[in-house]
Image: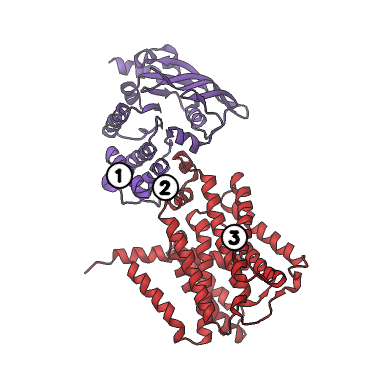
Amino acid sequence: MATLLEVKGLSKHFGGLHAVKELTFAVGEGEIVAIIGPNGAGKTTAFALISGFLTPNAGQVSFRGHPIVGRTPHELCALGIARTFQIARPFPRLTILRNVTVGALGRHPDLPTAEARARAVLEEVGLAAKSAQPASGLTLAERKRLELARALATEPILLLLDEVMAGLNATETERFVQLIRAINRRGITILLIEHVMRAVMSLSNRIIVLNYGEQIAEGPPAAVANDPGVIDAYLGEEYVSAAQS
Amino acid sequence: MKWAGLAVVVVLLALPAVLGSYAISVFILIFFYAFLGQTWNIVGGYAGQLSIGHAAFVGIGAYTAAILARDAGITPWLGMFVGGALAALLGAVIGYLGFRFGLRGFYFALLTVAFAEIARIVTLNTETTGGALGLYITFTGNPREFQFPNNRPHYYIALALMLLATGVAAWIERRRFGIYLAAIREDEEASEALGVNTFKYKMMAIVVSAFLTGMGGTFYAFYYLSLQPNTVFGIPLSVEIVIRPIVGGAGTLLGPILGSFLLTPLAELSRSYFATGGWTGVHLIAYGMLLIAVVLFAPQGVYPYLRRLLAWRPRG
């Protein structure tokens, strides 16, 4: 399995706060990797560093063997890294179709072609019926889908999903898990931040656990879930007893 | 929609045949301010980058064409493009400073005001521009010098400018460029994440907008035949440019035109009637009341409001 994304010694501090501290991990082609950890552990900061929204104080990030630190988000998007935002950021006054078309226009500058691509993606995420509506009227679950659809429309190689399942009910979460699996089967590598443990456990090939900006564990779901350090910092005793019963 | 637009254009083309000179002059202003509103709309409406310094582009275009005609005998028909190019250059400078250093919203607006003020003060203190005395163009009535014996040709030129700017905006609106501008207006960071080079597209928007606005400066100079720094570069003109598209509907194709048809006659009539009766400034009160009404009842502008009203009407 070839390495797609490699993060080495990545650090970011805001004043005296070390949001991310010497983070090192790699994501292989075709994998689904989850980053978990308590609130404030530095997960979203790590995403912002990888996707070019923040510049690290130290460390390297390489994508397909090329260093990418210092590249702007739109350049990284063109290279094939797409991200979603933790709090969905739809273009409220544009229609659903337009929202997704913006993503598609990068690879298909011609509007009709981009719109056709956008329609295909909307079909895939199950929003096709709403394509003519303005994005401002969507429910939370739909907004999360739209966020995913826009990122997909950029035709990424690596997809960074920042809590796309937060706030969804069990049915919606299950549908999202199916959707992410289907996207992964198409050959898109996925790195996701998630608190919904059911989704994390069933989706990921590997889990990386952060606490206070530092990586405290890494490994396959089962191993990570039984790691005493992880239970202590994040999952809690209740999770373990619930998972065992 | 297309046919309705065509019909309106045909009527506007025929209109001077039945209108008197004063009515024609009101229409000239309607078209000219619709034109300025539309050129502003490209950067201010579609891209959502609030410029309150567009008078700077009008002024540069006006002074450039006037000075080229006076000192070098260059016809304003050409000077128009030189003025546009210089305005575009200033637009690029303002855009670079604002967008490279991430000035948004009110901060960008203040930057544009600052540049317009700098342009005004420099012009006030420069000999070539006539300084505080202003620059006066001798009336010849020669079409080669952008002058005409009556105001009918001005009517058609102003109409052509309005249609030109609207055509450019319509062209942009239907392309990647326009869709990217709308995305930038809605959420810049989200646009970046989706692969939009926000800096590049904002630069393109302000340069195109400044170029067209600068071209309009030639019309201003040779219609009024007198240029005063405090008027051409003044904040009041910048506000006049901004207010029509905002009232009509910023970021929509018909917004600036609708806004101008609503506001220009109001301003013009109240200015000429109230001012002669000793009621100077009443038009500003009328402006203010209309603005409040728009903000309260149609915050997106009159055009989107009307479109919604029409869409709700049961058909048949």
Name the amino acid type tagged 2: Phe
Judge left or right: residue A179 versus residue A85: left
Residue B38 shows which numbered tag? none
Q: Is residue B189 left or right of residue B100?
A: left
Where does the image place residue A9, in percent across and percent down from the top left?
Answer: 55, 19
**Tags 3 and 2 both on a single chain:** no
Chain B colour is red
What chain letter is assigned to the residue under label 2?
A: A
Count every numbered label the image shows and give the total.
Answer: 3
Does A90 sit above or below residue A224?
Answer: below
Label at residue B52? 3
Which three-letter amino acid code belongs to the residue tagged 1?
A: Arg
The color chain A is rendered in: purple
Q: Is residue B69 visible?
A: yes
Real-space CA distance between mark 3 and mark 1, rounded to the nearest whole angstrom: 39 Å
Check the residue under mark 1 and report the chain it is in. Answer: A
Disc 3 residue type? Answer: Ile
Mark 1: which secondary structure? helix
Residue at the disc numbered 2: A91
Residue B16 place in picture, x, y as percent: 46, 83
Dot 2, how many residues are within 10 Å of its Cα: few (below 14), some (14-19), or many (20+)?
many
Label 3, label 2: how far apart the Cα atoms are: 25 Å
